[in-house]
Image: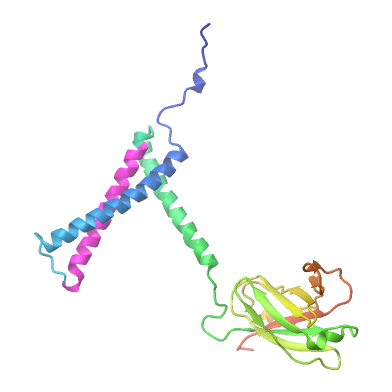
Amino acid sequence: MRQSYHSGVVEPANKLRFSAILVAAVAGLVGFGVFALLGAALASLLAAGPLHISSREGGAGYFAISVGMLSGVLGFVGTVWLVLRRCGVGGVKVVLGGIAAFAVIIVSAASAVGIWYSMQPHVLNLNGPEPILRIELHAPANIAIFADATAELTTDRNSADAVLEKPDEAATRRGYVPLYYRTSHRLLAVKFPNGGARLYNIRLPANPMPKKYHEWSTWYKPDFVDEPGSTGPKRADGSPDIEVRYHVETADD
């Protein structure tokens, strides 16, 4: 028995697919690179030979670069056209596909640059001294080893030891630590000689330079507690513990 199918299963011709655009973009990049190198090499030979272009003040080099770039553009256009034609695209859709392939390259390059830039450390105060995070630690009376505790500020960019004074009569220790980089991931660790620690998320934006962050914050209890001999920090239960407050200080204060 002869089986027939609906005409809807027949794939329409001259359809511009995203997969074809991606292939054309990759091929266009390759074509640009190959033709640019060949064009620059040929231009260098012509400049040194029949054209007698002087190498003084970079004349021959500029000529080779210009020819190489023009050749690369022609190579890109030709390669994209050829790939789209092989994919069954014709007419005005070849032009649209070429524009789309170029747009894919631009967006991909911009995304790569953006990712690279976001991964770089950005100095908080590029044209002056780094701001200071002033901190105060207050302990309940039953924490005897508070006087020997140290503190460290850790970010996703660096870590720095805090300078702490000895406790005063109110069981409060004051200190400071520099802020070098723009980041909103700052963790203050108060460490005890016996191996325990208290961890505090510093609630400041990536750029804490504005004046509103120069005022003392409220008192915060630890976000995490790391007891001696434990397998790692655990979320604090909110019971009385060492509290911290802080503010940012700049050279203008």
Horizontal and vertical percent for residue 66?
A: 24, 60
Q: Return the residue nearer the eye: 234 or 3.
A: 234
Q: Residue furthest right?
A: 142
Expressed as whole percent of the image width and height from the top left, the position of residue 171 reads 85, 89
- Position above or below: 252 against 217: below
Relative side of 98 to 46, left or right: right
The residue positioned 43% from the left and 32% from the top of the image is: 15
As displayed, is residue 76 above or below residue 64? above
- Is 197 left or right of 48, judged from the image as shown? right
* Residue 70 visible within the image: no
* Residue sitting nearer the eye, 169 or 45: 45
Name the residue at 56% across, 86% down.
Answer: 129
Q: How many marks?
A: 0
- The residue shown at (23%, 58%) is 40
Q: Is residue 142 magenta?
A: no
Q: Farthest residue to the top: give it.
A: 1
The residue positioned 21% from the left and 61% from the top of the image is 64
Give the magenta part as a residue range.
56-84
Considering depth in this image, is 142 or 174 the residue closer to the camera? 142
Quadrant housing residue 119? bottom right
Q: Is residue 253 visible?
A: yes
Magenta stretch, main secondary structure, is helix
Judge whether residue 62 is colored magenta.
Answer: yes
Where in the figure is residue 223, as x and y percent of width and height? 79, 70
Which of the image's four quarters has the C terminus? bottom right
Q: Position of residue 34 (x, y in %)?
A: 29, 51
Q: Quadrant of residue 60?
A: bottom left
Q: How is the image coloured?
A: rainbow
Foreground residue, 227 or 60? 227
